Image (cartoon, rainbow, N blue to C red):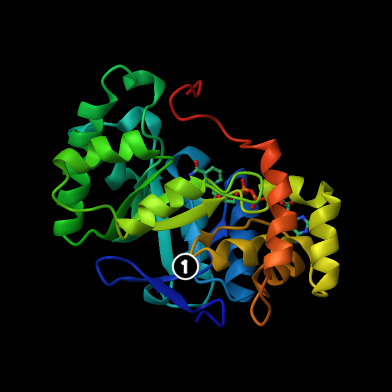
Amino acid sequence: MLQSLSDCYTLNNGVKIPCIGYGTFKTPNGGAVVDSVVNAVRAGYRHIDTAHRYDNEEGVGEAIRRCGVPREELFITSKLGNHHHGYREAMAAFDLSLKKLGLDYLDLYLIHWPAPLVCRENYKEKNAETWRAFEELYRAGKVRAIGLSNFWKPHLDALLETAEIKPMVNQLEIHPQFPHQELVDYCQSLGIQVESWGPLIQGKAFQYPVLKEVADKHRKTVAQVCVRWALDRGVLPLPKSNHYERMKENADVFGFSLDAEDLKRISSLEAYGRIGKDPDTAPF
Ligand code: NAD
């Protein structure tokens, strides 16, 4: 039972991953991301999510050095950019991410999108090659866990045909508007930890009266209901706020649970569907 921000899920290779991560999408490199990550660590987060694509890895690295918590107590994720699929490209991109972060290992490295525009025609072969690089990085001890992001069932099944090491994580758009429950169930049946990006529906959660009503019932906030909703499914949420009080609020989700009536009411939001791109038609 998860009882605090530093409690962990255990990945299929035994590595522990703090059960709520701190997101840095759209936080600009430099002072903004340094301040927000330092504050997130001060608020208790030990798991930080960045990506090549966010263009803020240098600032995240600076924050890691400044935050006052030893590197080995932090869990740092980055992701392979869409222009770097392929064996040699992925090896080079990983080194560049490490260099920008100023780290000598990553905790988790993910393939950000399964079928980028530049290799959509032959994405299966490209992912097989990319995964071979990921496996090599993992075996060499440069990364403690490897995984995927935005891989829906067909992308995942194709990768599993040639993978020697099963992915440990799949980071997906998951929130009350888009629970994607079949895919969550499938990943969980394979022992793949699901992470939720956009757990607060990228800010849209705050416009729905039904979430406010459920929150009021528990004397909690809408953000807390959304984070709790993810944890209750065994999913690992990555809420993002640049405000210290909200960072703390978003992680203060222990000691209450949603009941069947709440879940039924929240499920009415499924009518609105996903907000992110379909990985097979995304314009990037
Ligand atoms: P989110 O669902 O975390 O929502 C963030 C928005 O909610 C921001 O506008 C913020 O101001 C607002 N907010 C946060 N806490 C609040 C509070 N307590 N009260 C009121 N407003 C609040 O959206 P996100 O940042 O897109 O997703 C979280 C993280 O997931 C990202 O930062 C990133 O690390 C990751 N992500 C990954 C992918 C992917 O393709 N793998 C895509 C998007 C995001």
Q: Is mark 1 within 8 Å of ligand 1?
A: no
* Nearer the observer, 116 or 48: 116
Q: Under tag 1, what secondary structure? A: helix
Q: Is residue 144 above or below residue 7?
A: above
Q: Residue at x 18, y 50 (%)?
A: 135
- Give the labeled residue for mark 1: 65
Is residue 70 toward the left or the right of residue 278 in the image? left
Residue 14 position within the rendered picture, expressed as x and y whole percent measured from the top left: 27, 72
Residue 218 position within the rendered picture, expressed as x and y whole percent measured from the top left: 79, 74
Binning the other alpha carbons within 10 Å of mark 1 as few (below 14), some (14 to 19) or many (20 upward) gives some
Is any atom of residue 179 visible in this view?
Answer: yes
Tell me the kind of residue under disc 1.
Answer: Arg
Residue 260 position within the rendered picture, expressed as x and y whole percent measured from the top left: 67, 66
- What residue occupies the far top of the structure in this picture? 121
Is residue 223 toward the left or the right of residue 67 in the image? right
Q: Residue at x 86, y 52 (%)?
A: 209
